[in-house]
């Protein structure tokens, strides 16, 4: 029996025959994730097998088998992002869908989740007891645990903060198969504290942006929840995919403020944060109005061509603000008064938006269709600093973006999507491009030039682009060398979703004749 067959036999014994498959058709389905197809999944391969563990002990057993037989493994939650596609032969795909436990602690305002618990499930139960958290803008169908480990952007972060700040204690199977518990889980078996009395390793467990499964598998995590001014699941309104919650109109209001340029918009976002009001503060690209309203691509283009700004002109800056009377109706009235004063002070044209908009931000499934204009889209910028930094990093890429228009869609945009975190203490930005998927090669070249442009202007990208670390590393204090050292320490065989953590790192394989997964 070959070592590969021995490994599969051991995996079957660990999870049971019903939860193991090496059927080529099933494995093929695990060779591609969701967002990021065509450029982040270059070189993808069909995995060697798929396993579905049902407990932390089974996860540990899988990881130890992977170490014993030198087989790469990749943990996946809802598989929303293609950075978890296999790129090496005989990869073990660890599908966590059997582990979907959820416990809500109403008193301590937290939830303990397993990898396959989605935001839809969490928010459904949390709202019953008057609690909530911020679901990511990509949609509430994704894994709560995975999203807290990787990225974690969402509209409500103005008040509740970035996902890395909401992680409490966790249970973590390291790439070697050892189980590590962080925070209070390490001492009491209680998950309510992330900072202690046990080790606080959140900076290593996820860092700022996440490592895409390159540092083992987190099997349990506590996440912070926050107070809502009502209890119960609100009535749903609208027709799928445009649905929302009917929220209490005496506690929630959306406003839209228009500005002629992004400079004034940023001034207003600073003022809103300084006043410590609102639950959501985000600058929305003007084109998104038309994307959201369109049912088809033809419908989008009919409206956009009629109403887009003239050639050579930028679209206006549009800020969307959600106010919430978390404590009482008087709070909502006060915040509305302050917001209107800020709009007047900064020269904005303020309008109240429909109650439907208020319900969208809390609803359990976000309809996201940014691919409508051209069939696909990509992000070339991730700015995490101040609003001024985000605006500059996005705006000064405008000329570079023009070099790919056409064939990319001319969205008349100068500053992209900007969002407030922690009452304006962090300004986040993304620069979108809309294109057909056949233009992936052009997008990759454009993305690389955008990163070089950032480095030149000293507006360094805050996202970790593994495929560009040879460019980013030398510009960012050789962080890639540190990443390699981390990988070599915690994953000496480089088997946890290689090569995501450090692409330039060499895998240590068995060299003796007859050894290795490919032998036999």
Image (cartoon, rainbow, N blue to C red):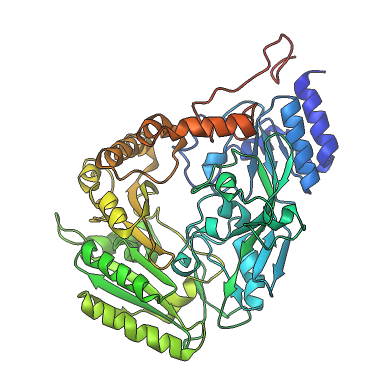
Which image quarter is the N terminus in? top right
Relative image position of residue 495 (x, y in whole percent): 64, 30
Q: In this view, does 283 lie to the left or right of 501?
A: left
**307 up-or-down from 442: above or below:** below
Quick one: 119 or 185, which is closer to the camera? Answer: 185
> Would you say residue 202 is visible in this rendering?
yes
Relative image position of residue 101 (x, y in whole percent): 74, 59
Quick one: 3 or 34, which is closer to the camera? Answer: 3
Residue 204 occupies which quadrant of the picture?
top right
Residue shown at 57% from the left, 72% from the top: 226
Numbered disc total: 0
Residue shown at 58% from the left, 83% from the top: 230
> Would you say residue 46 is visible in this rendering?
no
Judged from this view, the residue extending furthest toward the top is 513
Q: In this view, does 352 lie to the left or right of 186?
A: left
**339 up-or-down from 497: above or below:** below
Relative image position of residue 165 (x, y in whole percent): 53, 59
Quick one: 184 or 498, which is closer to the camera? Answer: 184
Residue shown at 22% from the left, 74% from the top: 346
Q: In this view, does 227 lie to the left or right of 435?
A: right
Relative image position of residue 356 (x, y in whole percent): 45, 78
Judged from this view, the residue extending furthest toward the bottom is 330
């Amino acid at each position: 029996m070959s070592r590969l067959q021995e490994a599969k036999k051991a995996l079957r014994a660990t999870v049971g025959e019903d939860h193991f498959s090496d059927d080529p058709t099933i494995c093929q389905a695990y060779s591609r994730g969701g967002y990021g197809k065509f450029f982040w999944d270059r070189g993808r391969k069909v995995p060697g097998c798929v396993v579905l563990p049902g407990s932390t002990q089974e996860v540990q057993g899988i990881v130890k088998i992977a170490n014993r037989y030198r087989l790469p493994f990749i943990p996946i939650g809802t598989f929303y992002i293609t950075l978890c596609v296999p790129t090496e032969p005989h990869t073990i795909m660890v599908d966590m869908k059997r582990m979907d436990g959820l416990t809500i602690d109403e008193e301590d305002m937290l939830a303990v989740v397993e990898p396959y618990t989605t935001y839809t499930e969490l928010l459904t139960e949390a709202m019953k007891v008057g609690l909530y958290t911020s679901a990511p803008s990509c949609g509430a169908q994704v894994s709560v645990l995975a999203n807290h480990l990787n990225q974690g952007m969402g509209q409500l972060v103005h008040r509740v903060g970035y996902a890395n700040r909401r992680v409490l204690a966790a249970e973590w199977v390291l790439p070697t198969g050892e189980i590590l518990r962080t925070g209070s889980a390490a001492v009491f078996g209680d998950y309510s504290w992330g900072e202690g009395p046990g080790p606080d390793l959140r900076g290593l467990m996820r860092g700022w942006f996440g490592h895409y499964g390159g540092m083992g598998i987190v099997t349990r995590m506590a996440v912070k929840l926050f107070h809502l001014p009502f209890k119960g699941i609100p009535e749903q309104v609208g027709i799928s995919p445009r649905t929302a919650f009917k929220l209490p109109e005496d506690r929630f209001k959306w406003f839209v403020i228009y500005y002629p340029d992004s400079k004034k918009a940023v001034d207003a976002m600073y003022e809103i944060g300084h006043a410590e009001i609102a639950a959501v503060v985000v600058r929305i690209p003007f084109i998104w109005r038309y994307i959201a309203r369109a049912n088809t691509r033809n419908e989008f283009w009919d409206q956009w061509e009629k109403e887009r700004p003239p050639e050579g002109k930028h679209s206006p800056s549009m800020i969307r603000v959600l106010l919430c009377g978390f404590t009482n109706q008087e709070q909502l009235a006060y915040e509305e008064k302050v917001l209107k004063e800020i709009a007047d002070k900064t020269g904005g044209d303020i309008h109240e938006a429909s109650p439907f908009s208020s319900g969208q931000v809390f609803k359990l499934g976000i309809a996201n269709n940014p691919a409508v204009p051209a069939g696909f889209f990509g992000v070339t910028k991730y700015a995490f600093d101040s609003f001024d930094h985000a605006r500059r990093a996005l705006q000064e890429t405008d000329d570079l973006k023009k070099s790919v228009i056409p064939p990319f869609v001319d969205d008349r945009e100068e500053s992209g999507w900007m969002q407030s975190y922690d009452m304006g203490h962090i300004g986040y930005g993304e620069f979108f491009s809309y294109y057909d998927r056949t233009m992936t090669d052009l997008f990759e070249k454009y993305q690389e030039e955008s990163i070089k442009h950032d480095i030149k202007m000293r507006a360094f990208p805050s996202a970790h682009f593994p495929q560009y670390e040879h460019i980013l590393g030398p510009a960012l204090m050789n962080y890639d060398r540190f990443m390699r050292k981390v990988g070599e320490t915690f994953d000496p065989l480089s088997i946890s979703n290689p090569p995501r953590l450090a692409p330039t790192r060499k895998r240590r394989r068995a060299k003796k004749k007859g050894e290795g997964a490919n032998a036999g």
